[in-house]
Image (cartoon, rainbow, N blue to C red):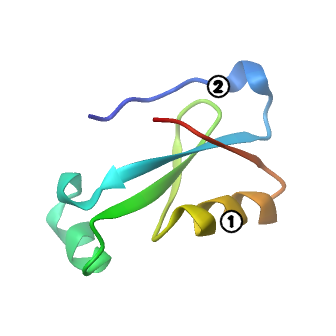
């Protein structure tokens, strides 16, 4: 499921992080994910995907390094 959230009412510095099953990714990205079953996507407040990373902790660190406020969505 590719749900796109719009959190723009929370401000321009909010990003959201969500888990993505590797099996739902295109073949090239699945190959790059190696043995991981889940990776994490980072999206800006209007839902545009900014990054895919290996774990939730890295996603939150990446957001904070760019002066963003990360939130988790399900």
**In front: 41, or 38?**
38
As drawn, 71 above or below 62: above
Left or right relative to 24: residue 10 = right
Sequence-first disc among 1 and 2 = 2
Q: Residue at x 57, y 23 (%)?
A: 6
Left or right relative to 62: residue 22 = left
Percent from the top left, x then y, of residue 40? 46, 57
Left or right relative to 73: residue 26 = left
Percent from the top left, x then y, of residue 27? 15, 66
Residue carrying label 1: 62
As drawn, 9 above or below 22: above
Q: State the count of labels.
A: 2
Q: Secondary structure at mark 2?
A: loop
Mark 1–mark 2 Cα distance, whole angstroms, equals 19 Å
Residue carrying label 2: 7
Q: Quadrant of the C terminus?
A: top left
Q: Secondary structure at mark 1?
A: helix
Q: Quadrant of the N terminus?
A: top left
Q: Residue at x 79, y 66 (%)?
A: 65
Residue 54, picture quadrant? bottom left
Residue 37, picture quadrant? bottom left
As drawn, 39 above or below 10: below
What's the mark number on residue 74?
Answer: none
């Amino acid at each position: 499921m590719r749900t796109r959230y719009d959190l723009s009412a929370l401000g321009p510095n909010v990003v959201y992080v969500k888990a993505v099953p590797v099996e739902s990714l295109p073949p090239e990205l699945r190959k790059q994910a190696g043995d991981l079953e889940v990776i994490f996507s980072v999206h800006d407040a209007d839902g545009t995907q900014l990054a895919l990373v290996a774990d939730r902790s890295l996603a939150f660190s990446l957001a904070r390094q760019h002066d963003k406020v990360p939130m988790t969505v399900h």
